[in-house]
Image: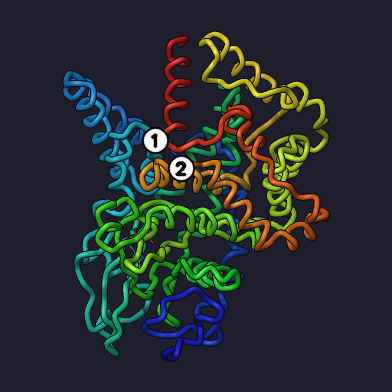
């Protein structure tokens, strides 16, 4: 084998990189711990609810949305159902682009939710992944020059004026360094920080009011949502933190010997707050089914690697790519996945990671009490919750009743009872799981797109088996469990999907049909 670059030993990088990583040579890395600490210190002031929201911004948001809706109401709505949806979706996407990064990010989440959100909306918001209108090249150059403190020509032989892509907070241009090295330059949009801080203030003002007025909103935990958003966006706006995240995620993959993912190398010197020079990676879009055929890449393998890769980092090291969506990855013709955009990197503290491990072990063992206790330790339930009582109240020890066999009235009643009980216990979405759930929305959509006939039961069994054989001893030791006791129990998984023991397989298509039945019954009652 030809000489491999030495940095592959500690990073899941490409074999043919433009340079190799040597931690001692990264001149921007030393500043990162202080930058992280600073981002953390600023958090309380960013998320404390102001007495008044920034009125001008709040007004702009309402105005742009109302105009979009009004235009649709008077024109598109009158056409056929699908055309009307498409028109509304387009107007909402344009509104999101006008309103800037916060709303574009929301659009990216919606675009991930194939099978969850209406198809017209998903298709339209796909443009928010990487085809947002870019800033002018002049604006881009001035950010680069200001941050590097040098004229462009002192660093680059050439910077392409047309970006490869433009997304919520940045756009990426191909470029060539003076020494001939081909790179890409990620440049932060000039006004983004200001806009984001205004939106944060609006959200911080709104979140507690939402909980006060609409009690069920408490389940989604809006204040924690605002906190997660504030934290991730503050880190995301500092590209030196992103550079460090790239190395961390690449390092976790290398340690796990998970070489199916490739991370771009950040440049040893050219990384500043708003400019990130890095290795260019290429490939095709994950939802481009033709390209899989052309290159002979197995969609099923991509889904499987995606599932394992994204769980493994979180469960074993507590570090994972926190912003999976179609714009932040390419599938390579060699079947590996190029991961991009490490602005949001999920990190779990040791106690939370272990609670998460216990949740999944208990889930695959059909241990209801264990799952609830783990959820409590993750912060979903107050610390003094009587777990046994909750399990009894929610009927978790009883046989599963398949919701698709219920009459609409029964279904609604059941749902109301559960929601009421959860609210009474003070249940809410744990902060630590929010990024994870966001990634799950993407994985769900990816399966819908790439492998609708995949048997989900078999797949979950495969992933559980992989973890048991690869990391079982270690995980069991960490949570103080006897590894020989572990036994995968299919009934727990079936229960999670709301079906009983008789059901052998569950493809994504079947799951989708079930969701459809439940939705239409709920609508029938509404
Ligand atoms: N190293 C890279 N090589 C090639 N294309 C890239 C690279 N990094 C990012 N891109 C492209 O640029 C787009 C925007 O970059 P990204 O880091 O996702 O910015 P944002 O934080 O605004 O989402 C990505 O969606 C991707 O299409
Ligand atoms: Mg991105």
The residue carrying mark 2 is 444
Provide the secondary structure element on which disc 1 rests: loop
The label on residue 235 is none
| Total count of labels | 2
Residue 136 position (above or below residue 494): below
Q: Residue at x 70, y 45 (%)?
A: 359
Give the image quadrant in which the ligand numbered 1 is located. Answer: bottom left
Query: Could you tell me which quadrant the N terminus lies in?
Result: bottom left
Label 1–label 2 contact, CB within 8 A: yes
Viewer-closest of 272 and 301: 301
Q: Is residue 116 left or right of residue 179?
A: right
Residue 376 position (above or below residue 3): above
The residue carrying mark 1 is 115
Image location (x, y in percent) of residue 195: 39, 49
Residue 18 position (above or below residue 314): below
Image location (x, y in percent) of residue 462: 57, 51
Residue 434: image quadrant is: top right
Viewer-closest of 341 and 44: 341
The reply to whether residue 426 is in sight is yes
């Amino acid at each position: 084998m030809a000489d491999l670059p030495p940095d592959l030993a500690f990073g899941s990088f490409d074999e043919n990189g433009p340079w190799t990583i040597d931690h001692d040579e990264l001149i921007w890395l030393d500043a990162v711990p202080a930058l992280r600490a600073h981002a953390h210190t600023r958090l309380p002031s960013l998320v404390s609810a102001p007495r008044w929201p920034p009125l001008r911004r709040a007004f702009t948001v309402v105005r742009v949305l109302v105009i979009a809706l009004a235009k649709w109401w008077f024109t598109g709505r009158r056409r056929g159902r699908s055309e009307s949806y498409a028109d509304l979706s387009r107007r909402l996407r344009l509104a999101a682009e006008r309103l800037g990064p916060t709303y574009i990010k929301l659009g990216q989440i919606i675009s991930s939710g194939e099978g969850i959100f209406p198809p017209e909306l998903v298709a339209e918001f796909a443009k928010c992944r990487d085809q947002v209108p870019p800033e002018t090249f002049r604006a881009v150059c001035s950010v680069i020059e200001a941050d590097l403190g040098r004229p462009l020509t002192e660093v680059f032989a050439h910077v392409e004026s047309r970006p490869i892509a433009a997304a919520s907070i940045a756009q990426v241009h191909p470029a060539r360094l003076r020494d001939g090295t081909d790179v890409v330059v990620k440049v932060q949009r000039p006004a983004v920080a200001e806009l984001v801080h205004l939106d944060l203030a609006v959200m911080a003002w709104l979140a507690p009011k939402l909980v006060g007025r609409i009690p069920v909103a408490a389940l989604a935990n809006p204040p924690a949502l605002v906190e997660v958003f504030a934290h991730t966006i503050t880190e995301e706006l500092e590209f030196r933190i992103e550079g460090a995240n790239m190395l961390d995620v690449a390092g976790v993959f290398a340690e796990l010997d998970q070489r199916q993912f490739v991370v771009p190398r950040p440049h040893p010197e050219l990384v500043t707050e708003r400019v990130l020079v890095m290795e260019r990676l290429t490939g095709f879009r994950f939802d481009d089914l033709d390209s899989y055929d052309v290159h002979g890449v197995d969609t099923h393998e991509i889904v499987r690697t995606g599932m394992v890769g994204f769980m493994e980092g979180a469960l074993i090291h507590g570090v994972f790519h926190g912003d999976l969506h179609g714009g932040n990855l390419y599938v390579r013709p060699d079947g590996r996945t190029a991961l991009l955009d490490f602005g949001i990197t999920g990190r779990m503290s040791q106690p939370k990671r272990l609670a998460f491990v216990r949740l999944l072990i208990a889930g695959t063992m059909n241990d209801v009490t264990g799952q609830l206790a783990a959820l409590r330790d993750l912060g979903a339930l107050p610390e003094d919750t009587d777990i046994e009582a909750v399990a009894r109240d929610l009927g978790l020890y009883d046989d599963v009743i398949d919701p698709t066999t219920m009459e609409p009235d029964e279904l609604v009643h059941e749902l109301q009872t559960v929601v009421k009980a959860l609210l009474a216990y003070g249940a809410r979405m744990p902060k630590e799981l929010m990024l994870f759930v966001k990634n799950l929305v993407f994985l769900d959509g990816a399966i819908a797109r790439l492998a609708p006939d995949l048997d989900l039961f078999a797949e979950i069994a495969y992933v559980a088996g992989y973890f048991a054989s690869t990391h079982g001893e270690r995980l069991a030791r960490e949570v103080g469990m006897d590894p020989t006791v572990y036994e995968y129990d299919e009934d727990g998984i079936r229960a999670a999907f709301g079906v009983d023991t008789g059901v052998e397989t569950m493809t994504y298509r079947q799951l989708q049909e079930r969701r459809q039945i439940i939705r239409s019954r709920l609508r029938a009652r509404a």
